[in-house]
């Protein structure tokens, strides 16, 4: 059967006849991808065998039939309801380009539909349009197209593979706004543009502008986008009091000498607002050829924030100066200075014992709460500081006087009662006047003892002489003052 078909096909070709061939079908595919060839057939042939062949459609030229199972690179499917059978060729190669025939087997001569397959490398393009943008800024990509694509779909995708560009498009002419991407089509100039806003470093890379055509491969142009990173931002912190003035020194590139110099306020470049407009308190002075200064007078609490020096309306990568300004109320600033001058800890030396058992005690002044002081008005604050210092001075004086006046006196009393003699130890005496009063009493008792000794039957010796011992007095010791000496028994 196939020999007869081959003979008939050759005869028709030699006679330049179309035989039963239908209209020519053009199919295009990129190498490494797949392509589908769809062929229709007349009603009544739904149950007949269909096939795809190449060249003269000899036995060895038949690629696949509907009666066969799918092959590694070829598959076929017959949709009888629509009377269209489709053959898929995967992993296209340059050798796959050429003429194919869609055939329907029947008695006599088969039905044929000619197919022309074109292949192309999956890459683009010979020329590339290089575009640069700044981080945080915006960029516009221009995409020209030919007259065949005026009414066709336009799109932009990342990468350089035309075969998957439409499926992976970031924006198309059917949806002109998609997040940071916006598409505009100028059909008169046959150029569509895509604007990308709020650029990031990740936006850098290859892009393809695509436009569909009436036939053949889609029209593509390549773009290489480079997003530059912000660099070298100098940050300075300034603190000033409300009502005063401050001057900000701003360097700028030499090529901006004739540009307008101004200051903008905002935590980020994206929300930085020009503060020079309508503000008489902000004054610009050009001091040098490569720097200018901005003076802010009559500072207010609302002036606190982040400022940027600007010498051009658009943000471009370069050296910028950033200021963090903090404005404080004058009353708070005075309290801050007082707190800084106020001692946090005073160490007072306690009285020192004149004997070898002397000990040193440290008295620590209580720490002053910053929150408590800030709650007082200025007059009360100054009074508190004066009283606090006075109390410290009085305490030191009292401790010194107390040490000099306090001492311990030890006396020995001798009493005779028959043959018995008792030794009585005097109690500790405190206070200057009490010491003198007790001293007189001691003299009188000494005279009496001397008289008693003349009549005593026993003589005593080795009587200890009077001793005086001065010891340190602490709050933990009991002080006995103005006690009479123990009388003899």
Image: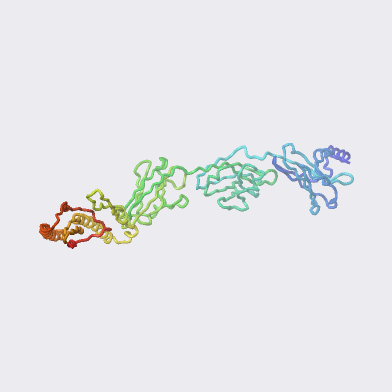
Q: Is residue 76 visible?
A: yes
Q: Is residue 417 left or right of residue 199?
A: left
Q: Nearer the viewer, residue 213 or 1?
A: 1
Pinpoint residue 189: horizontal percent, then vertical percent. 59, 46
Pinpoint residue 333: horizontal percent, then vertical percent. 32, 55
Q: Nearer the viewer, residue 269 or 255?
A: 269
Q: Is residue 414 left or right of residue 68?
A: left
Number of disc labels: 0
Q: Quadrant of the N terminus?
A: top right
Q: Measured along the vertical axis of the image, is residue 365 above or below residue 287?
A: below
Quadrant of the rendered structure where residue 327 is? bottom left
The structure residue drawn at horizontal position 72% and vertical position 41%, both measured from the top left corner, is 91
Q: Measured along the vertical axis of the image, is residue 30 above or below residue 354?
A: above
Quadrant of the rendered structure where residue 368 is? bottom left
Q: Is residue 338 left or right of residue 207?
A: left
Quadrant of the rendered structure where residue 377 is? bottom left
Pinpoint residue 9: horizontal percent, then vertical percent. 85, 40
Pinpoint residue 391: horizontal percent, then vertical percent. 24, 58
Q: Quadrant of the C terminus?
A: bottom left
Q: Is residue 91 left or right of residue 11?
A: left
Q: Which of 458 and 74 is in front in this view?
A: 458
């Amino acid at each position: 059967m196939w020999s007869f078909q081959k003979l008939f096909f050759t005869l028709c070709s030699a006679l330049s006849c179309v035989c039963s061939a239908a209209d020519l079908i053009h199919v295009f595919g990129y190498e490494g991808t797949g392509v589908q060839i769809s062929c229709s057939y007349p009603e009544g042939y739904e149950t007949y065998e269909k096939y795809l062949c190449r060249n003269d459609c000899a036995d060895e030229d038949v690629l696949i039939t509907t009666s066969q199972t799918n092959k590694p690179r070829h598959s076929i499917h017959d949709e009888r309801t629509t009377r269209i059978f489709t053959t898929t060729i995967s992993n296209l190669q340059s050798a796959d380009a050429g003429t194919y025939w869609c055939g329907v087997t029947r008695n006599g001569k088969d039905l044929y539909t000619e197919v022309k397959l074109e292949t192309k490398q999956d890459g683009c393009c010979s020329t590339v349009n290089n575009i640069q943008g700044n981080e945080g800024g915006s960029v516009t990509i221009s995409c020209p197209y030919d007259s065949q694509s005026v009414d066709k779909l336009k799109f932009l995708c990342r990468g350089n593979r035309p075969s998957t560009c439409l499926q992976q498009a970031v924006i198309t002419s059917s949806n002109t706004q998609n997040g940071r991407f916006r598409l505009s089509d100028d059909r008169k100039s046959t150029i569509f543009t895509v604007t990308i806003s709020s650029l990031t470093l990740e936006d850098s890379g290859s892009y393809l502008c695509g436009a569909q055509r009436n036939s053949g491969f889609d029209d593509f142009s390549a773009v290489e986008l480079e997003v530059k990173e912000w660099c070298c931002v100098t940050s300075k912190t300034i603190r000033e009091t409300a009502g005063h003035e401050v001057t900000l020194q701003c360097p700028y590139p030499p090529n901006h000498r004739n540009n307008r110099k101004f200051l903008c306020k905002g935590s980020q470049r994206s929300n930085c607002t020009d503060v020079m407009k309508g503000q008489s308190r902000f004054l610009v002075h050009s001091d040098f050829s490569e720097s200018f200064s901005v003076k802010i007078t009559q500072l207010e609490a609302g002036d606190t924030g982040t400022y940027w020096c600007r010498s051009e309306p658009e943000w471009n990568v370069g050296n910028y100066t950033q200021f963090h300004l903090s404005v404080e109320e004058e009353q708070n600033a005075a309290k801050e200075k007082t707190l800084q001058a106020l001692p946090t800890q005073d160490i007072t030396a306690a009285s020192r014992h004149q004997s070898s058992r002397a000990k040193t005690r440290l008295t620590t002044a209580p720490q002053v709460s910053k929150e408590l002081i800030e709650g007082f008005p200025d007059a009360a604050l100054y009074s508190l500081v004066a009283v606090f210092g006075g109390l410290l001075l009085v305490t030191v004086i009292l401790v010194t006087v107390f040490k000099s006046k306090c001492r311990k006196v030890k006396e020995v009393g001798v009493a005779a009662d028959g043959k018995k003699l008792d030794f009585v130890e005097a109690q500790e005496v405190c206070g200057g006047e009490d010491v003198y009063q007790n001293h007189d009493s001691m003299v009188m008792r000494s005279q009496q003892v001397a008289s008693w000794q003349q009549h005593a039957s026993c003589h005593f010796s080795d009587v200890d002489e009077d001793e005086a011992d001065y010891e340190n007095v602490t709050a933990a010791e009991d002080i006995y003052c103005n006690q009479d000496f123990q009388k003899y028994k």
